[in-house]
Image (cartoon, rainbow, N blue to C red):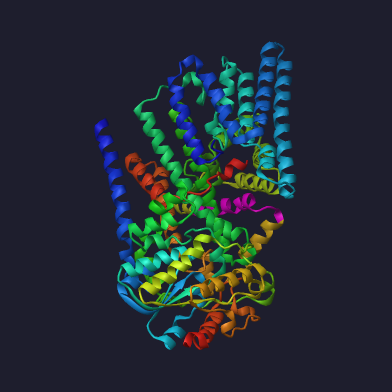
Amino acid sequence: MKNKRIISVLVIILLMVSLLIIKAEYASLIYRDSTYGMPALVAKGGIENLYLGSSMFRQGLDIESIENHQGDSYILAYNGNQPISELIELEYLISNNVKIKNLYVDMYAYSMTAVPDISDDKLFLETDISTKYRLWQSIEDKSLRKLWSVCVSANNDMILTAPIVNPILNSQFRSGGALTVTGGLDGDACGKLVPPVDTDIINEEQKKAVGDIVTLCKENDIEVVFIETPKSQVVMRDLNYRSIMESYRELLDDHGVQYISSEDYKFDYDNSYNFIDAIHLSYQGRVNFSENLLICDKLAQ
Amino acid sequence: MLSFSIYSLIIYGILGAIIYHYIPQKYRGIFLSVFSILVCTVWMRGAVTCLIFAISVGIACLKLMDRCINPDRRKWILGVGISILIFNLLCHKLLYSYFVGNKTYEGNSFVTFVMPLGLSYYSFKIISYLIDRYIGKITNATFWEFVSYVSLFTQIASGPISRYEEVDVNSSIDVEPKLVYEAVYRLTKGLFYKLVIADRLSTYTITVMNDYNSYSSMALWMAMLLFSIELYADFAGYSEIAIGLCCLFGFNVKENFRNPYFSSSFREFWNRWHISLSTWLRDYVYIPLGGNRRGELRKAANVLIVFLVSGIWHGNNLCYILWGLWHGILNILSPKEIKRKCNIYLGRIFTFLLVSLGWLCFRLESVADICSYLDGMINRWSLSLGDIVSSIMPFSGDMSCVAIVLTIGLFIVLTAILEWNEYRGHKVNKNLRVGFYTFSVILFGAMGANGFIYANY
């Protein structure tokens, strides 16, 4: 009886470990038919215009406007995406034979000051074991709690409820771009916004990752352009933000890379309804920005 | 050193139990006392002096009572001892209410000293011991046995408020496979309730209840009902872990919860919720006041007093007194027996709703907040799609939290089914449940900071 119990426990442990390994390697297959994320892009096999970034891009770029102007396009955005993780995502796509002609990278100032981390667990769901390992190696917080989250508990809700949740989420996106219509802020709310970060010290690993993205693009004949999305006035006027953006522009100049900053397109920063918070655009702001971006001279070049 | 959390409780509990069973019987009281005080020192830091003070008052009272033959004088000594303990408890609650309520404190160390972990629980344990000793129910406990009973670290944070005979080191049995299995069952169940239900629900309740003026009536109703479930899962989860750890020590501690949310009346609810507190109040407040032996009016008054004491035990903020009054009045009005089946089902729904309304007193900071919240529940109904969506999923700009909402909903339904089976008295397949709880905790447990709500009382 005792032996039977021990064997049962061992079998259950083995089953659980096997499930976790299968999840780590193959869970992304559930999302190959999605309208967003990396598995769908890998399934597509290639894209002419790829917009790679954080929630700034997901909230800030209107896929309908982009497709009308540029044709075949895709927005690949994860919450809190940083240059380090963007580099790994790009390497993953290239290693999975995704052909990219033009790459547009999110020129988000605060990601340059951030300690390497992965905010969006979906990244661990949508990649294979070796890429998960690389992502894990890149982050600074290697606590047991984080390791448990990465290897065991992250995204289980999504997998468990995939039959119901996937169709709902797919209806919210097209080619990775959000279709949701969000309202903007009124003047009073806008007046209470504060910049989310209070430092201008650039993280060296993020800086190196930007250089590595540029190098990777050159090696694979990908035209790369960095794009700054509009932020609320309180951020645009913040001295730290301006200092970081100046350093970012100098870095890109050193690498001989094109960028489109806030000076290169028109945008109504005074209209509070263009924003839902200090750094993200509303639906109205998204459409306005996208239309202005796509007709700006630098992008046309 | 691990500060107080679910993980430190389990680690110290298992470690302590292993050492405990290697120690000869006659030294177990000393070991458990010393080990418990050491663990409490790690958890409470300087505030352990409060525990030592309370134990000292208890010891002094016992010694004086033992030396005294005059029954009136013994009664007087008992009264003084109980008064000092209650005074100590009330002072700490007042200080906590003043400083923390006014936000004039800085840092957790001050809070832990002003409202030490477990003060309410061990104060009541000492009082029950003193009274039981006075009436002759306990006759031969030694100094170390008393200290180990009061300071037992597995129960210090959130109870149960066990009686001495439940955790008497002399009656602890040697560990055997059946006991270990029972402990495993309770530990996995407790972890499931805490990590899979309570901690996940807290994401929703915190988001809505901390900013309730921004949400529609639907969100406020949902938050209220989900907070009820969260509070139960948190507290019952802790109790299961505490009782499970006591099993490892060989103690036979009674249940603290018996599926209370299926109760069809308030009377039944209080026979199933926080049973160790309700029986304590019955034995040491209600019955000494006369119970139901002096007419209906006096009985109603006694019930009200009991629930007021219960409210003050939880906190001396007006909200808790209001909560005590709420339960007292509803208990008085509660029918003795419900015969018709449809009335039983209606009774279950109303009892759950009324109990949930009462929990607002625990969650909100003032009576004004409660009134404002209730007003929101009534006057901010909206059938717009945006409001309905933000009621169900208030904490994410995108729809990915649909998965989280569906998962927690699934687990609540599964838990309700399991609890309903227990309530009906059906046989519990513990093997299957251990597997289910373990599987769910590993894959879906929220591995956050993991304190306990009821450790604040």
Q: Which of A63 and A45 lies nearest the eye of the viewer?
A: A45
Q: Indicate left or right for B445 with B454 as reference.
A: left
Which quarter of the picture shows residue B429? top left
Q: Residue at x 65, y 53 (%)?
A: B364
Work out whether B189 lies above or below A104.
Answer: above
Residue A131 image position (x, y, % from top left): 36, 60
Residue visible at 46% across and 65% down in the picture: A209
Closer-to-camera residue (B411/A90): A90
Whether residue B34 is in magenta: the answer is: no
Tell me what residue is drawn at x 56 percent, y 79 percent: A261
- The image position of residue B442, as x and y in percent, is 39, 47
Q: Quadrant of the N terminus of chain A?
A: top left
Magenta stretch: helix, strand or loop mostly = helix
Q: Position of residue A232 (x, y in %)?
A: 62, 75
Q: Above or below — where is B339 with respect to B148?
A: below
Q: Which residues are magenta?
A: B346-367
- Residue at 56% x, 74% y is A249
Residue B364 within the segment the image draws in magenta: yes
Number of numbered callouts drawn: 0
Give residue A83's position: percent from left, percent from top. Answer: 48, 66
Residue B276 placement: quadrant: top right
* Left or right of A161 in this view: B358: right
Residue B339 visible at all: no
Q: Is residue A205 visible?
A: yes
Along the viewing direction, whichever of A235 and B47 lies nearer the viewer: A235
